[in-house]
Image: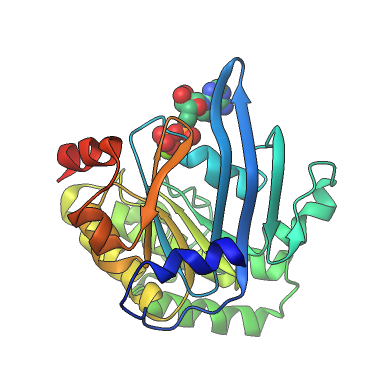
Amino acid sequence: QHAAASNSASSGIPPSPPIADEIIIQTKKLNKSFGDKQVLKDIDFEVRKGEVVALIGPSGSGKSTLIRCLNALEKADSGDIYIHGQKLNPHLSVKQLSPIRRELGMVFQHFNLFPHMTVLQNVIAAPLLVRKMSRDEAIALGESLLAKVGLLDKRDTYPSRLSGGQKQRVAIARALAMQPQALLFDEPTSALDPELVGEVLRVMKDLAYEGRTMIVVTHEMFFARDVSDRVVFMDSGSIIEQGDPEELFRAPKQKRTQAFLERML
Ligand code: ADP
Ligand code: MG
């Protein structure tokens, strides 16, 4: 609560829509090594309800590992993770983890759609299987989400017939279909041809303005500056600097942040 409160206090501008006090994601002193390489170093991080956090930093700085720890795709060596108040205990079984993981919708660089399923089937598979939603209810939800990402006309198409931008928008609809507490994006536009990046960012922008809770790992600096509520800069496994996007981009305090932004902008 304390650490979170000081974060947005640095910005004089009230965020819109308002961010609640409720913490959706929190890590405390998170550490992770691969072999003798320490990839996450004492990461204290939190995301509050309705907040859009852009996670930026050089390749290899630990951004994906942090995201993957949150979703229990990686196990941290030490430290604590809380997802919507539930502790992600490393000793939990897959079955015990499942309801916690469901709180987070993941969107990856490579869309990972099921190739043998239509667009609609991709979107409703998890609600049917995991949420045990009725077929009619799942279809209604799936269609509304496809409409939201502008792809209702593709509902019966197979992923192989879609452009990369369309595939990623389906992946976003699929993540939303589980009605998660937060959405985690790991470089969602990095694998796309440049002309397809905009359509995906536009959908993400709509979600941000709807008040969704989001973490976005991205190299799209303008998206980070214009859409996020807070930018977190990581380097070599540490959070080096974070704060109000406009301020951080205009006047980064740390040398490493300055050097990174100079390379990126
Ligand atoms: P980023 O997403 O910021 O580019 P990553 O979290 O992917 O960074 O990687 C951080 C560091 O951890 C890199 O040096 C990477 O090579 C290493 N790493 C990531 N995943 C593994 C893994 N499964 N095994 C060994 N090293 C890994
Ligand atoms: Mg990465």
> In the image, residue 64 lies at what x, y percent?
48, 40
Residue 223 position (above or below residue 37): below
Q: Is residue 165 left or right of residue 136?
A: left
Q: Is residue 108 left or right of residue 122?
A: left
- Indicate the quadrant containing the N terminus: top left, top right, bottom left or bottom right: bottom right
Q: Is residue 14 left or right of residue 143?
A: left
> In the image, residue 84 lies at what x, y percent?
68, 66
The answer to which image quadrant residue 3 occupies is bottom right
Residue 169 shows in this picture = yes
- Which image quadrant shows ligand 2? top left
> In the image, residue 69 lies at what x, y percent?
62, 43
The residue drawn where x is 33% and y is 57% is 162
Closer to the camera in the image, 12 or 82: 12
Residue 232 shows in this picture = no
The residue drawn where x is 62% and y is 57% is 26
> In the image, residue 198 lies at what x, y percent?
21, 61
Residue 9 position (above or below residue 93): below
The residue drawn where x is 36% and y is 81% is 14
Closer to the camera in the image, 98 or 90: 90
